[in-house]
Amino acid sequence: MTGLKDRTAIVGIGQTRFAKMLPETELQLACIAIRAALDDAGIAPDEVDALGCFTQETTPEFEIARNLGFGELHFFSQVAHGGGAICGAIGQVCAAIALGIARVGVVWRSRKRGDPSKRQWAGVQPRIDDHWKWSRPHGLSRPADEVAMLMRRYMHDHGATREDLAGVALAQRAYANANPDALMRDKPLDLNAYLDARMIADPLCLFDNCLESDGAIAIVITSAERARDLRHRPVLVHAFSQGMSREHQLMTDYHGQDPFLSSSAATAGNLWRQSDIAPADIDVAQIYDAFSPLVLFSLENYGFCGRGEAARFVAAGETGRGGRLPVNTAGGSLSEVYLHGANLVTEAVRQLRGTAINQVADAANCLVSSCDSTPNGALVLRC
Amino acid sequence: MTMIETFPLPVTDNVVDAGFWRACADGRLTVQNCRACGHVQHPPRAMCPACRSTELGWRDTAGTGRIWSFTVAHPPLLPAFAALAPHAVALVELDDFPGIRMVGALLRDGATMFGGVDPATLSIGAPVRVGFVPMADDVALPCWTPVNPDLSKDNAS
């Protein structure tokens, strides 16, 4: 009874090169990525009439439209909460297309944060009046600190260890080592190097943190009907939901009854309700990974592992090559590039087209999720 | 963008939570409660989510709790915290209001400034009591002092 199921498709993906520091501006990078995505789709720029982006995006819709030579626009939306936003930005444009409000949509993320001064926590002001006033004055100041608090509790509750958690970073690094676009392509990582790494927010070490990088990614969406006539195998948007946990508090979601029942649980319940594809049918998953514990928490909240079981699952290599559920198969935010999860969507598309570097054989169904510790969203994609 | 050199501090004159900060300045740790239905919550809100009343007040707590979790921050950090690194911060569940959790820096027994608590002495479940650190004329920051830290590991739940 859902009006969105399989009605729209991702038909084009594009990206700039990824690097620690790029000379182009965020606007230039956005334009390059969007042009590449439209070329990939074989759709003319003046057909685009819907845009979706992040509230944190610095390249406004009118600049995008007038630089790329779009025609009149009929739908544009922005989604908040950084790492939680990409699936919502895509899903909202899909809904607009399914409802007949618009015909062709572009979603993009362009970001330069290789420069340390661009890190949001570094911009904290001397006096704080939003919800951060309850944690930042105490020195819980960076997203890594906020996630580390939950990871230590998880270890305590379930007997998980740093060796277990290492499974996330090691699997993704191995994928990145095969990916010529990944920032970490030439840097292998083994368990000893992981365990010896410097601590950032104990129990999280350097390799549990995403990269800081520059780049842009764009995604083109249109109706499933139109998609059939385009050059690539369409990647259908099968199910979509956003989610926010009861009593949610952004990043420091510590005050509800069960802090591990995050916004991902809210998203997952409503996502699977709409989906003919169940967790057991998912062949490959792209799970938001700004910090490696988010992968564990998401694996449990989306129903791939029972409560407390995700640490053993990743430690056993089940998210790596040949595992039961390959996750973040291009290297993810930890080892490919950090673009607020937009690279997870492009990798999902490549897997379902059958063109991924670390191709999962016969991949037909893919979950894409966004940040576990913010209001978030997810997509079930299929080919 | 230049990082601030000082510790970031809370605004204390927002009507929603000013009562919390006044109590801290008084040496009392409080939780917000609803005068209509009795619901207790932290952090404070503008409305009671249980009954939608805006008649909200404050209840004193015993100022003791158990470490629900903690983390230890290492650089890169804001300069003020970098000087204290490694810097331990706890999430504490209050003894007399189970389920109510508060974030707080760790404070050594008898100290007037947070920091300097050896992370190796901390464990989940360990008992702590509140201590107020004067950060500004209007800010007494509620922080947590391990109770008998030498025994805290044995007390871990």
Image (tube, coloured by chain):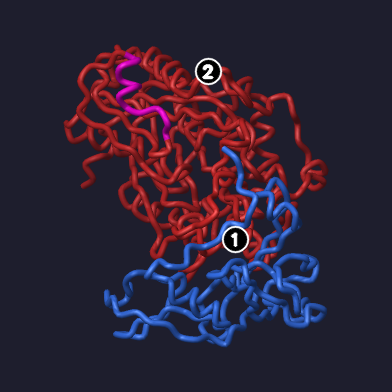
Magenta range: A57-68
Q: Position of residue A242 (x, y in %)?
A: 36, 48
Tag shown at residue A244: none
Using the rendered image, report if marks 2 and 1 lie on a common chain: yes
Q: Type of residue at label 2?
A: Glu
Residues A218 and A275: in front is A218
Q: Report how far apart the C-alphas of labels 2 and 1 lie in the structure.
A: 37 Å
Give the color of chain A as drawn: red
* Residue appearing at x 70%, y 40% in the figure: A170
* Residue appearing at x 30%, y 29% in the figure: A51
Question: What number of labels is visible?
Answer: 2
- The image shows residue B36, relative to residue A373, as above or below, that is below
Q: Type of residue at label 1?
A: Leu
Q: Which residue is mark 2?
A: A24
- Is A62 in the magenta? yes
Looking at the figure, which quarter contains the C terminus of chain A? top left
- Is B156 in the magenta? no
Q: Which residue is mark 1?
A: A150
> Could you say which chain is coloured blue in the image?
B
Q: Quadrant of residue A112?
A: top right
Q: Chain of mark 1?
A: A
- The image shows residue A2, relative to residue B45, as above or below, that is above
